[in-house]
Image (cartoon, rainbow, N blue to C red):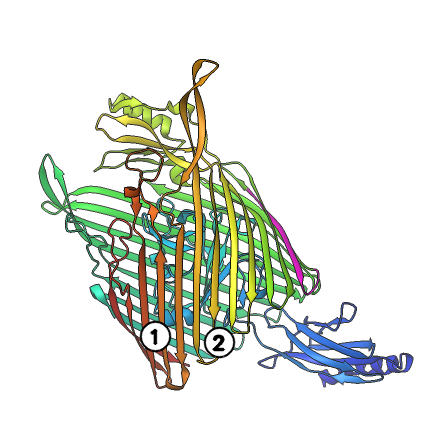
Amino acid sequence: MKLIKRLVPFLLVLGFRTIVFPQSGSIIGRVTSSNGDSISGASVYLSESKWHITNDDGMYSISTITPGNYSLIVTSLGYTKKTIPVEIKADQTLSINVTLEIKVYKEKEVLITASRSEKSLDEISVPVAIVDQEEIETTGSIRLTDILDEQIGMNVVSNHGTGIQVQGFDPDYTLILIDNQPVIGRTAGTLNLERLAVGNVEQIEIVKGPSSALWGSNALAGVINIITEKAEQPIKWNVTGRYGTHDSYDGSSNLSFKKGDFSGQIFGNINSSNGYDLSKNTVAPTIPKYDNYTFSGEAGYRLSKKFSVSLNSRYYRENQTYDDRIDISNQPEDLNGTEFQENFSVAPSIKLLISDKQLFEATAFFSSFESESNLDFQSTGESYFNDSFGQTLNKYEVQSSTFWDNQHTTIAGIGMNREDLTADIYADVPFFDSYFGFGQHEWDLNKKLSLTTGFRFDAHSEYSSQLSPKFSALYKPSKLIHIRGSFGGGFKAPDFRQLFLNFTNPIAGYSVFGTSTVQEGIDQLQQDGQIEELYVNPSELTDIQSESSIAYNLGFDLFLTDRITFKINGFRNNVDELIETQRIALKTNGQSVFSYVNLNKIYTQGVETELSYNPDFISGLNISAGYQYLDAQREITFEQDDVQNGQVVTVTKKIYIPLFNRSKHTANFKLFYAFEKIGLDASLRIRHRGKYWFSDNNVNNSPDENEYAENHTMINTSIAKQLGKSFKIRVGINNLNNYKNEILLPSNPGTTFYTQLNINIY
């Protein structure tokens, strides 16, 4: 009855307009979701001047339409867009009901990291890559490093954990997110990606190039956002167990459920290994015996069609045990080593959909990280060395999204961060408070051209304010070519260690001080008679500033045929105020004292290409190949005697030299095959990394042939068979060609084998 009452005014108006405008047509209808619910606030477009917003019952009406052929476009936040061709005749009233599908992360089409809103991959104007759930499953990957190492333009590096290089930047320049929230707990700038399980991941979004305009510090090189699976079925349960070389075990369970307006997910992962040793010259293993646990949960409730709340949480803990040995007065002493890491986070959020044109989101994020390392004498049990570290981050943010029409979208937000750290090696560390605001506007001028401009302003308690601009454009001159261009600024703030570190290695004997502790530290060492020579007067060291960058990207997507796509992207990143470690003194024990300074500039530039092919003569086969050329160099200054006007004078010169650990040439090849009729899938992935400058042994600031690390290739493969509806068994071999190097890549143990069982219950 209610529906009939609401239809009567529409019908009366339509009848009146039919009399007044006898040559016009009309459309009426209702917009619903796939589960039958009415969608209020949906936008129904026929043209720029003919559009309507649905009422509480999902009803719409568009009248006085000139006869002709049109495209009826229906959009609503959280649903896939639908386009329906219609023909309007004079004096005709069409009744068109529209059903919209809920937008979920099921395809390689929808991502949020690049624009902070849901956008199709085809609509993004910056360099992005997406790894979907199907690829994660087919490769047999269980940790984030497994996936990222196989992406073009990305290199796994080992330095205080396993991190990732993006466009030639070190791991500490890339921001890692889980569902849009940062992962904390970096060691010497590196976030160990082995901590992150991917058993409940829907897709991984990779944005290359500076993203500080949207995400702030540590996004100078880009952003990697891990999107976890969302509940869309009444119940879904997945269990995976894997056993492999070195007595490694990985087990995951992921349960999701949805009933009415309530949904939730519970995920658990256990990962363990006996470790391995690539060097027989040391007692301590390359990778010690470990076990870790990951538990995460998500709950969401839609209080009304316009208001919803959610809560995400995550817990991680890792334990390690190993043996070590030291020499004390030429007497060897055996040690027992233990380490643990623990990370907990919780993120409540609310969403308020005022209309299809206005969305407000508010989130809070609370995270803590702790780690502790101990070395005890095996003979007495007494402690030889202890080091503990604690970090907390509280983050609050409010974001507004305004969808003015089908051409204009504005996103704006404000927020604050409070960061705290406790550790024996850090002296008198205050709270870090920062406040930020950001804005972005997207303008679709027409079907071929769209522009995006934005900025972010960060004000910090310990360093100067930062303004990060952004501009990008997407141009589609035809169906055969898409052109993407972007310009952006990024920054990386000094971290705790660079400002407040006060550390002396108990075994090696070297010392490292932050810029706020270096004067006091040098004074104390001088009083203790431990300084042999002072290279730099600590009073001359100034406060370090944030590193900043300007970057350019230009890319082309060529759709050569329906089954062949070629992508090419060129990039250039210029970084100023690079923060570097500088030796400032020599100790009487022959070791050095280090601190941090803004010294040099760097640049990274190069080209990335990718070719993908889905042959029509073999259904289910996907082949792709990628290549990156990288030129990464840093500026150095030095003094040199020169003859000017007959006199010898000392002049300062600047030159650029290659950065360590950067390969000019990297390439990959991927082959995926799914034979659905018999439930079989297989993959072959080949990764090649060219040689790179590893160390400057003779300190001549130039790479010599014997200072290069060797090029190497890694081959991974897997095959799986579906057994009935719910079971799948997979076997795989990683590093089939058995490449090993304990110095360059200690995280790689050589060839490993595994067997994996997956159970899905719907």
Residue extending farthest top: 646
Q: Is residue 363 above or below residue 673?
A: above
User: Looking at the image, is mark 2 or mark 1 nearer the viewer?
Assistant: 1
First along the sequence among labels 2 and 1:
1
Task: Work out whether residue 518 or residue 550 is closer to the camera in this orientation and state it.
Answer: 550
Residue 343: image x %, image y %?
36, 55
Name which residue type carries label 2.
Lys
Q: Quadrant of the C terminus?
A: bottom left
Give me the disc on residue 239. Answer: 1
Q: Secondary structure at mark 2?
A: strand
Q: Could you tell whether 345 is left or right of 115 in the image?
A: left
Does the magenta portion include 457? Answer: yes
Does the magenta portion include 530? Answer: no
Residue 115 can be seen, yes or no: yes
Magenta-tinted stretch = 445-458
To which quarter of the image does residue 441 belong? Answer: bottom right
Q: Mark 2 = which residue? A: 258
Name which residue type carries label 1.
Val
Circle count:
2
Q: Secondary structure at mark 1?
A: strand
Mark 2 nearby-residue class (10 Å; few <14, some 14–19, many ≥20)? some
Residue 428: image x %, image y %?
38, 35
Q: Are marks 2 and 1 in contact (CB under 8 Å)?
A: no
Task: Work out whether residue 639 or residue 359 is closer to the camera in this orientation and state it.
Answer: 639
Mark 1 nearby-residue class (10 Å; few <14, some 14–19, many ≥20)? some
Task: Work out whether residue 722 or residue 610 is closer to the camera in this orientation and state it.
Answer: 610
Residue 312: image x %, image y %?
45, 62
